Image (cartoon, rainbow, N blue to C red):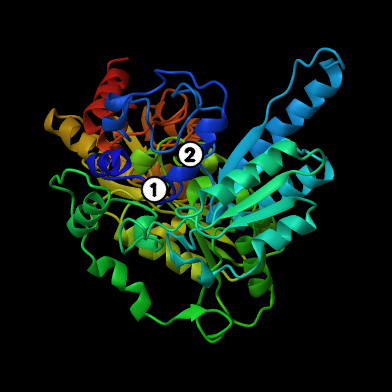
Amino acid sequence: MLIVDAVQNAKAGHPGMALGMAEVGCMLCGIIQEIPSGLTGIEDLRCLCKLGSRTPGHPENTVTDGIEVTTGPLGQGVANAVGLALAEAHLAARFNKPDCVIIDHRIYCIMGDGCAMEGISHEAASLAGLWNLHKLTLIYDDNCNTIDGPTTLAFSEDISARFRALDWKTFTVDNIHDDMDSFKDALLSAFNETRKPTFIRVCALEDHIFQKGGTSKAHHGTFDEDDVKEMKQKLVWDHREPFHVIPVVYSLSSRLPRLLCASLPSGRNISYGVREHAMAGISNGIALRRSGLITFAATFLTFSDYMKNSVRLSALSHAGVLYSMTHDSIGLGEDGPTHQPVEQLAGLRAVPRLPVFRPADGNETAGAYKVAITSRKVPSVIALSRQKVAANLEGTSAKEVERGGYIVSDNSGKCKPEIILLGTGTELCLCEGSAKMLRKEGRKGRVVSLVCWSLFDRQPLEYKERVSPRSVPKGVGVEAGFPIGWKEYAGDGGVVIGVEDFGASGAYLDTFMKLGFTEENVTKVAKSLLTQ
């Protein structure tokens, strides 16, 4: 119940695998010869997903003792495990002698359904079989669900057969909760294997402790009161007041039969599963069919790196794919730096022929979609936030988005502004709030939205000078991303408030405050410029 208590307290987390694979974890601890003590404690569990804690939303090897690799994005752990096993084999070959074995350790990796879908796991597993990494054991948590729902939405292949084809030794444990002996036998067989890596498919539904186990409701997030009560009763655990999740939210998807799949080819939504690279490549094919279909692909912005080559090909081949990339900054919060994009905006902006929009509100989002949809031979990226934002800011415009940048507010009248605050996305609101503070003190300040740099760069010089004149060298650029490129807009005497390191796991307001994304800090920086 520590798993449930930690997730309930944090109001965030991925409890499904932890609950379903509890027996596997215990068995692995039993065969590992030495486990250091004191790595984490109860207080660390209470601080799950909190800013500055040793238990971020996704484990990080630089934060928590005992964490060997930072995975986060799905499939990375499989590749990490192959690398660890390859290093072991290499070092053993170099330094072990018949009478002196120095290097002799095994690699155990647990992967989920999402990891199995990612192309990186296929590639890494292929190499592991080719290289005969027999000290590598991959344990597959086959719990038949992802955050979207049952894996049957996007997953039908025989995973064990795939690994056999990749020259792995395979085992299946049909019910880990009632058949620990079969799992133990598989581990012993893997231990004695001298040529092939081992793949153990473990059916680990959570329905042995509550009815919703084995469904997407157990995969991610907190539990409702009945779930926790049921689990505590079945596990003979003292009942405590829990956090309630509204069940009706989970029932919506099953009532909307609009999926494009084998049984409903006329649908409009494709269940790619967790396959960003394939999703982008298939979208390019749809767009280049030139049939009039408008195709879009959606994922977290940080995972755009998985699909980057296909995104480049969209631009190179004039495939008008609309990429909707959400969770666009450190505002993602509790999931921590593995899921918080920092350098991704800069990398995407560097791709030729790829407009990257970062709208601030509903007005700008509508404008960005209009530009993207009407540009059939130009792909677009629309980066959207996760955290709560104002529906519409005063002064924003859907129409002006097509220019890439425009004046949102200004109290300078016919005079030049003393300072210009430039922002994108959710940080435009901070600029507006700071401008109001400065204006109360009698300062002349202008707020500019730079919703799409490449479109603004293509505007006539006269227009760009009207929006952000070079004769006003004091500008403050504000964006929760890597600040490269911002100096061109903030001016030679300007300052950029950006993110030059990875984010942190914590409530997004705490994370924003720690990294200087507050109206007060923007105002402080602006005042400092004005006194120079």
Q: Which amino acid lies under the numbered mark 2 shown in the image of this protein?
A: Gly
- Residue 75 visible to the viewer: no
- Residue 469 visible to the viewer: yes
41 up-or-down from 263: above or below: above
367 up-or-down from 78: above or below: below
The answer to which of 236 and 318 lies nearer the viewer is 236
| Left/right of residue 133 with respect to residue 390 in the rendered view | right
The answer to which of 244 and 185 lies nearer the viewer is 185
| Left/right of residue 252 with respect to residue 144 in the rendered view | left
Q: Secondary structure at mark 1?
A: helix
The percent position of residue 527, horizontal first and vertical second, equals: 25, 22
The answer to which of 452 and 306 lies nearer the viewer is 306
Check the image and name the residue furthest to the top: 100
Q: Secondary structure at mark 2?
A: helix
* Residue at the image point whose x is 40% and y is 45% from the top: 466
The percent position of residue 526, horizontal first and vertical second, equals: 29, 25
Q: Quadrant of the C terminus?
A: top left
Q: Are marks 1 and 2 in contact (CB under 8 Å)?
A: no
Badge 2 is on which residue? 25
Q: Quadrant of the N terminus?
A: top left
Q: Which amino acid lies under the numbered mark 1 shown in the image of this protein?
A: Leu
Badge 1 is on which residue? 19
* Residue at the image point whose x is 46% and y is 42% from the top: 339
The answer to which of 243 and 373 lies nearer the viewer is 243
The percent position of residue 174, horizontal first and vertical second, equals: 55, 60
* Residue at the image point whose x is 58% and y is 66% from the top: 321
